[in-house]
Amino acid sequence: MRAAEEDVAASPFARLPDALVALVLSHLSDVASIGRALTVSRGFAAAGTADARLVWARAAAALQWRLRRRESETDRELCVRANARRQRIAVFGGSFRSPLYTHDMYDVARQEWLPSPFLFTTYPRDASALASDGATVALLGGWGGTRAVRAVEAASLTEEARSWKRLTPLPRRLCFGAAQMDASGRLWFAGGGVLHLDGGAWREAGELVSPRCGLAVAADARSSSFFALGGYAGGTRYLSTAEAFDTATGKSTPIPSMGVARSGPGAAVGPDGALYVVGGSSFRAL
């Protein structure tokens, strides 16, 4: 322990003026860099204790778009919580002239894109549905280049070798749908009607009030419902309507419409219990 303390004291960073130490710390914007700085110099560590807001403010500001600050939580506590949870954002498939096999993963705490740990899926696909419960991710259907595909594949988010396992294919070729896993890990697909993977077989689970593709779904962990939002209804009909589908009863109930009609948005229920809808496209007559 003493040898380590002597190494830190001998570091050239230890001889930096306090003002320069503070300036360096104030420009670090990710948790990993701040952590390394605080361990490399007593001056950095002292500054981090004396003026925690100066040290952590930039990193906290960069994280707040993804991680909601808790009541009375400091900048440092927010950064440490984000780093401890090792949050990731994963992107699968898509299209650039033709459907893609590729995956990308973003590390929220380190604020950088990482090489994907996932192996290639069976099919390249665009407009597939994606669902995850935090431990498993599933890809359902999608556009394979010349036609829609039925394939459903799942991979573990916790195992080192993240290979894909084939699940029961969808009962028909489907793309531009949306999917969710509920609190019990059950898999649901919405687009037109609603399908449910039950005991290794897909079953018709109910109908939406408004048939739609290109919709978003978001699960409410506090209830048995998920929300179906927006989408495309054919021709020039882009939807602003939204509904709540109860997985226990198979009934769907309209909820207040969004302010903008949109197809292909993203949606989630936030930690504050609010329903958020982001992006999408909408028809505009020229």
Image (spheres, rainbow, N blue to C red):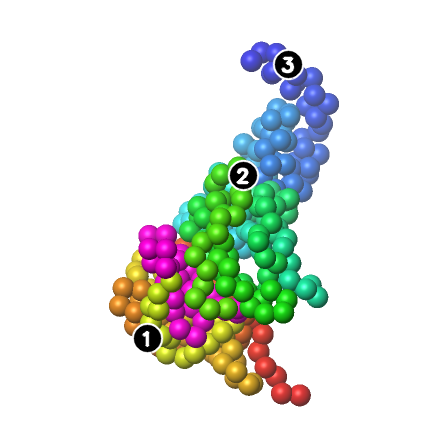
Front label number (1 vs 2) = 2
Q: Which residue is mark 3?
A: 6
- Name the amino acid type tagged 3: Glu
232 lies left or right of 96: left
Q: In whole angstroms, how far apart are the C-alphas of marks 1 and 3?
A: 67 Å
Sort mark 3 into few (<14), some (14-19) or many (20+) by Cα contacts within 10 Å: few
Sort mark 2 into few (<14), some (14-19) or many (20+) by Cα contacts within 10 Å: few
Q: In whole angstroms, how far apart are the C-alphas of marks 2 and 3?
A: 41 Å
Q: Position of residue 217 (x, y in %)?
A: 44, 66
Q: Which mark is residue 161?
A: 2
Q: First in sequence: mark 2 or mark 3?
A: 3
- Name the amino acid type tagged 1: Thr
Q: Quadrant of residue 208?
A: bottom left
> Where is 160 relative to 151, above or below?
above
- Name the amino acid type tagged 2: Ala
Label 2 SS: loop
Q: Position of residue 191 (x, y in %)?
A: 45, 71
Q: First in sequence: mark 1 or mark 3?
A: 3
Label 1 SS: strand
